[in-house]
Every structure is written in C-alpha cells, then in structure tokens.
Amino acid sequence: MRLERLAMNKFKVFLTFDDMKERGITKEDLWQDVPKVHDLFRDMMHEADDELGFKVDGPIAVEVFAMPAQGMVFIVTKGNPDEDFDDDFEEGYIEMQVTLDETDDVFYAFKDFEDVIELSARLYPFGVVGGTLYSFEQAYYLRFEDYDLEGIEEEAFIALLSEFGSPSTITTYRVEEYGKCLMELEAVYRIYHTFIK
C-alpha cells in the first residue's frame, strides 16, 4: 500500500492486486459492503494518519479506480460537514461517500526514457506495437488500450512492463490533462524503429 498526499484535505492510496490478495480481498469485494472492505478502509485511514498526519474526523468521499493487472487507486477527500454531507455524525464516526470507476487501460510509469526504449526492444518482438507515450513531472508513461493487446498473453506482457517500470499511481486522466503526449498510437513501433532498428 502506497500513500501520497495530494492536498491538505486529500490523499491517494495505491493498492496492488498482491496487497489485496494478502488481505483476502478481490476487486469484486470492493463493489460490495463486506466487513473485510471496512477493515481495508480502516487500515488506510490509520496508515494515512501515521504516514501523512491526515486525521479523519468527519465525513470523507472515496473515489476508487480499478486498473487491470495493476491494482486499485483510492482518492480520499475529507469533506466539510456543511458541504455535500449530513452534519449529524457522531464523534469518531466516519461517513463515506464512495464512487467506483474501472478502466481497461494498462498504464505504467517509467523513471527514464532509456527504460522505455529498452522495454520497446522487448515488446516489439513479443508482438506489441501499440501504446501511447506521455511525459509528466519528470517521468514517462505508457498507456495500452484493449485493442493494443489483442492476441497478447497478458501475464507475460505485464511481467515485461514490470521489469522496466511500475504501475502508475497517477490516473490516465491527470497525465492526459497536465502532461504532454509524446507519441499517440503505435508508440512501441515508433520507439523501436527510431532508437533500435
């Protein structure tokens, strides 16, 4: 579980599928109101308090984004009791408003452009030629959509991505809006033929 403060009243939690497996939680469990999901949120709030000094003393809004083969991103926002929430909550009680979203995109972050080049050298012979390349805050991001991965063995593909990068804890929406699109469509093909062949 990785936490990152986004603002005074907001933080982000990235939970890999391995983290969820250790806790005995599946992606489908998050869509349901089960005790182990409550335990997960309680752990997130305790960790946010310990690591970020984020005290939850009222209502919160939680946005959940599922990313295939990567994990889940939770955006937790502490609300003002007089805005969008009922103010009749007990002391120490957390009121949650949860929004769930799921994407089929595979979105990975890379520290250096060299990592992207080396990855392309491995992906191209594997049959992957698609993808969109972005840069944002001194990092590079590759996004692959469903059509980029048709006929590709997903587990081997994710293993290759993980060898050179890591699942992005930033959403594609944020990178698309604030980052720069360097190569739209067929990024792996273009990188391979520009820097390797």
Image: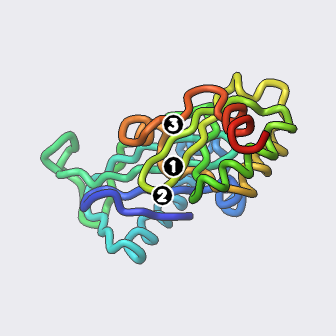
- Which element type, helix, strand or loop, lies under badge 2? strand
What residue lies at 79% left-to-right and 45% top-to-bottom? Answer: 121
**Residue at left offset 84%, top offset 45%:** 156
Q: Nearer the viewer, residue 50 or 129?
A: 129
Q: Is residue 65 above or below residue 57?
A: above
Pointer 3 local density, CA inside 10 Å: few below 14, some 14–19, many at least 20: few
Question: Does the CB distance between marks 3 and 1 fall below 8 Å?
Answer: no
Q: Give how far across and how far down residue 34 sits, in percent.
A: 57, 48
Give the mark toward the camera: 2 or 3: 3
Query: In the image, which disc is placed on residue 5?
Result: none
**Residue situated in front as seen by the camera: 183 or 153:** 183
The amino acid pointed to by label 1 is Val
Q: Which residue is mark 3?
A: 182
Q: Is residue 99 visible?
A: no
The reply to whether discs 2 and 1 touch (Cβ–Cβ < 8 Å) is yes
Q: What amino acid type should be assigned to the residue bearing mark 3?
A: Leu
The image shows residue 26 at horizontal and vertical percentages of: 67, 47
Disc 1 element: strand
Q: Tell me the tag on residue 13.
A: 2
The residue singled out by tag 1 in the image is: 73
- Determine the CA span between mark 3 and mark 1: 25 Å
